Image (tube, rainbow, N blue to C red):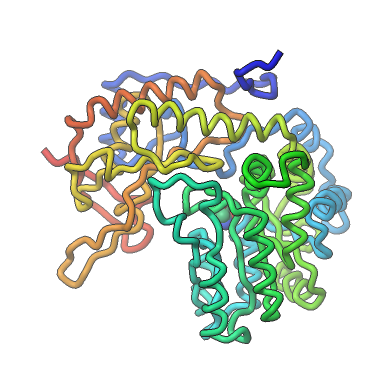
Amino acid sequence: MHPKTIIEPFKIKSVEPIRFTTREEREALLKEAGYNPFLLPAEDVLIDLLTDSGTSAMSAKQWAGIMEGDESYAGSKSFYRFEAVIKSLTHMKHIIPTHQGRAAEKILFSIVGGTGKFIPNNTHFDTTRANVEFTGAEAVDLLNEIGKHPEIRADFKGNMDIEKLEAFIKEKGSENIPLCMITITNNSGGGQPVSMQNIRETKEICKKYGIPLFLDACRFAENAYFIKLREKGYENKTPLEIAQEMFSYADGVTMSAKKDALVNIGGFLAMNDDELAMKCRNLLIVTEGFPTYGGLAGRDLEAVAQGLLEIVDEHYLQYRIRSIEYLGERLIAAGVPIIEPPGGHAIYIDAKRFLPNIPADQYPGQSIVAELYLEGGVRAVEIGSVMFGKYDNNGKLIPSMMELVRMAIPRRVYTQSHIDYLIEVVIEVFKNRDKLKGYKITYEAPMLRHFTAKFEPIK
Ligand SMILES: *Cc1c(COP(=O)(O)O)cnc(C)c1O
């Protein structure tokens, strides 16, 4: 038998109730939150798709690991397990735990960054960019052209533009480029994967100019599974073998364990260079803690180690990638405009095409986000002019390039019936799109305004 339905590859041992609210209650709650879902108490949200970061459900073995955690200050047994699992995955010589991804970035770029330096990447995630720029260095995105077109379907829309990378190195001088990064999958670009060929070719260019290659590996397992599905020669390899090959081209890794290590907190930095590792550990002691715990508890290290073993399970990855694709397929079939093809961890609604009559300065993405909550208690996030908009000298909005709404799917948290419910909610909002109103901002902070801004619907 070849069943068509891909089921969740787990059964549920512990459950967390979710709270149902009426539309009237949600109207009051959203108004109270200034129409900004970031300001809603999570308890009042039915399906929470704000992020896939730190929101995973842990397995029974991970919870058992929490009890097994060795809380010794130095030389904890849990550290050695953490180190052994990451070494067998990445084959890196030095494994340095950190409390989350940005702490790894902060340490790395404090050492290699600085004014006059450049860090190329397919697309920097926002914390990576912030940590590069905080040192005075410049963060440069060299994404392949096809990755910039939300309506074009292609297999590897996260790829680095190899030609641009080489031209960039020649222009700036390899002595000013302390390292090059590739983010897998490309989070800011819709969770789109990078091909093995592209990682290999990027490595060849880096090697030619003596530049180390680092992977921002937050979603390495999702990327590995896309390679298995889409790249010739990898169909019969296991996700672990594919991941090991990806890491074999790298000289170092930064990772937020809150994504593909299936934990609620954690991260690491890994590398082969002895001298760089020594500098990183010295800084780690100042900012995070002793090198065998790095800002984490022993129990967290156990949970990360176990999560990294579970994430490369083929049944898990098949279910993960298929459930996002399923959500995407159903929305496309109903005419809802999304970034195609669906990425590995989220569906991005294209708010410009969804609400063509609401101009950027009335925040179409925010309007959809508000309506998703009102209609079905779903919390999503605007990734458009609320998040990235700037003002010119006359106070006029300079809109973001794209107006998107991201629905990020937490790992192992929601079942297919939750996703079916979500599909109904999105389609209902889409059917009523002519009734949706624009929004104006009534309060905003000078920086990162999307977290705390307040809005009002335009009558
Ligand atoms: C989440 C993320 C980070 C930062 O990790 P935190 O654990 O949130 O600090 C860096 N890069 C990418 C691609 C990410 O998705």
Image quarter (top left, top right, bottom left or bottom right) of the C terminus: top left
The picture places residue 115, in percent across and down from the top left corner, at: 52, 84
Q: Residue furthest top?
A: 1
Q: Residue at x 34, y 32 (%)?
A: 336
In the rendered structure, the answer to whether residue 329 lies left or right of residue 27 reads right
In the rendered structure, the answer to whether residue 386 lies left or right of residue 160 reads left
The picture places residue 103, in percent across and down from the top left corner, at: 62, 61
Q: Residue at x 37, y 40 (%)?
A: 349
Q: Residue at x 38, y 21 (%)?
A: 424
The picture places residue 217, in percent across and down from the top left corner, at: 65, 54
Q: Is residue 24 above or below residue 395?
A: above
Quarter residue 50 falls in: top left
Q: Residue furthest front?
A: 232
The picture places residue 168, in percent across and down from the top left corner, at: 52, 78
Q: Who is closer to the viewer here, 6 or 127?
A: 6
Q: Is residue 38 visible?
A: no
Q: Who is closer to the viewer here, 314 or 429?
A: 314
Q: Is residue 278 above or below residue 190?
A: below
Quarter residue 437 falls in: top left
Q: Is residue 119 visible?
A: yes
Q: Is residue 303 above or below residue 61?
A: below
In the rendered structure, the answer to whether residue 346 lies left or right of residue 368 reads right
Q: Who is closer to the viewer here, 170 or 304?
A: 170
